[in-house]
Structures are given as C-alpha cells and as structure tokens.
Image (spheres, rainbow, N blue to C red):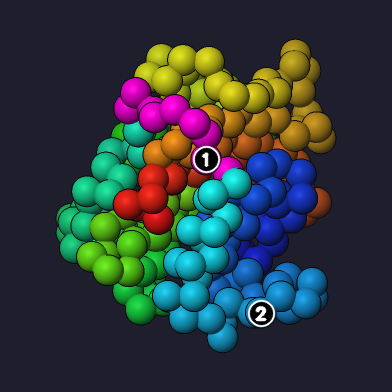
Amino acid sequence: MRRWKWTIRLGGLLAAATLVIGLLHLPAARPLLALVGACPVGRASATEIEDARRIALRSLRGSTRAPVRPALRFELERTTLDEVRGWAQARAIACDLSRESTLLVCSRVPADALASDALQPIDEVAFVFRLRDRRLVNLTTLTTGVAPGRAADSFAAITGALASALGSPEASRVPPRQWDGTRPVFIRYRYADYIADVSAMRLPGRGVVVREQYMSASENGS
C-alpha cells in the first residue's frame, strides 16, 4: 500500500472535510472508506468522485473571491494534465497516472521544482484534474519524517508566503516555541473560488508530517 493510506488520519484532526476531498482521489483511501461504511473509492468512477467533490465544496467554500489563487508553480483551472506530465518528465520525477487520467501522483519531488517554500524534498504530490478537460483543480503535497524544528520552519515559510499573497487566514494555529509536533498546527483559507490548507502534526511511526493543499472551489472548477 502507498503511504497515502495513513494520511487519512489527519482528516479527523485537521481540516477533515477538505482533506477527505483530496484523499477521495487516492487509491490508498479505500481501506478507511470501507471501515466507515462508505463506498470504497476503488468502485467509484471519476465522475462519481467529481460529483462528491462538488457537493462537499458547497459547504466548504467562502463567500468572497480570492484576490489570487496560489497553487505552487501551477495555475488552478488552467494548467493541463499534459503540462504537468511534461514538467515531471523534464525533471525525471516519477509519477503514476490513474482514475481515468484525473489523478497524477508524483514521488520525491524537490521543493524548488514546485516553487514551494517547503525546506525539504516532498514525498508525494497529488494532482487532481477536472474530468471534462483534464485541467488542474486540486494539488496536495505530503512530506513525512520531518524534524519538529524543521517542520515548524517549513510551516512558517509556506504560510508566510500565503499570507503575503492572501492576507490573514480564516483560521490558524501556529507552532509555539519548543513545538514537538504533538499538537497539530494549521492555517486555513476559504474563498468562493479557492481553498488552501497547510498543516503539520506528528503521527506514530511517521514523525512530523507537513501537508499543503490548494484547490479550486469555483462552480466552474468543481
């Protein structure tokens, strides 16, 4: 099983609904969904997953439009699947395409390849594409085994860049001094056309996990 199967644990602690939207597209979400009595993603089509995402976004999106919609080096609703695959191939980054060509998961991605403010290579990056035209609507990164101090620094760098672009978040909990990763930290933005989440926490056997998610929340993009 891919390491994504355990990332679902974050859903119960940090931005659960938004995390589930991203993880519904990932193969390793199946065991948890089966346990809770939901329809396993393995039996859901790309259309069904996209419909579920659209429904969830109705309760997640905010009321005003975002001044900008940061998504690392990519553009939500503009960047195509072919463009992301070309980006990965040019950098010799290994990726797996699935879910009717709507999900591309790339491994061991250098932070500078993504134009991310993360301070270490990123274990996995999941790109989710709109079914009708294969344009990017969701980008999620995951980095595991990060030392608490470095995770706090990475969290500060990522969220600082978001604050410069978007201003104050809707909600946040920042790492206190001497943070050891036990208490989750996060920052959250909610707009009518855009959602962004950054979180960090310690998971048993995995060390501190840092996660970024950038998602189109517009009706057109959902």
Q: Label 2 sits on what residue type?
A: Cys
Q: Residue at x 79, y 72 (%)?
A: 36
Query: Of 88 and 145, which appears nearest the observer?
Result: 88
Q: Give the left or right position of residue 146, taking residue 137 as reference.
A: right
SS assignment for the magenta stretch, majority: loop
Q: Residue at x 52, y 34 (%)?
A: 62
Q: Dot 2 corresponds to which residue?
A: 39
Q: Residue at x 65, y 36 (%)?
A: 200
Q: Give the left or right position of residue 213, taking residue 176 as reference.
A: left
Query: Of 140 and 115, which appears nearest the observer?
Result: 140
Q: Judge whether residue 125 is colored magenta.
A: no
Q: Judge whether residue 65 is colored magenta.
A: yes
Q: Dot 1 corresponds to which residue?
A: 61
Q: Label 2 vs label 1: CA separation?
A: 24 Å
What kind of element bears circle 2?
loop
Magenta segment boundaries in residue numbering: 60-68
The reply to whether the C-beta atoms of the residues labelled 2 and 1 are less than 8 Å apart is no
Res. 14 image quadrant:
top right
What kind of element bears circle 1?
loop
Q: Label 1 sits on what residue type?
A: Arg
The spot of residue 93 in percent (x, y) is: 31, 58
Q: Residue at x 26, y 64 (%)?
A: 134
Q: First in sequence: mark 2 or mark 1?
A: 2
The spot of residue 28 in percent (x, y) is: 60, 71
Res. 35 image quadrant:
bottom right
Disc number placed over residue 102 in the picture, else none: none
How crowded is the residue under tag 2: few (<14 C-alpha within 10 Å), some, or many (20+)? few
How crowded is the residue under tag 1: few (<14 C-alpha within 10 Å), some, or many (20+)? many
Q: Is residue 164 above or below residue 215?
A: above
Q: Give the left or right position of residue 93, taking residue 44 as reference.
A: left
The spot of residue 146 in percent (x, y) is: 62, 39
Q: Quadrant of the C terminus?
A: bottom left
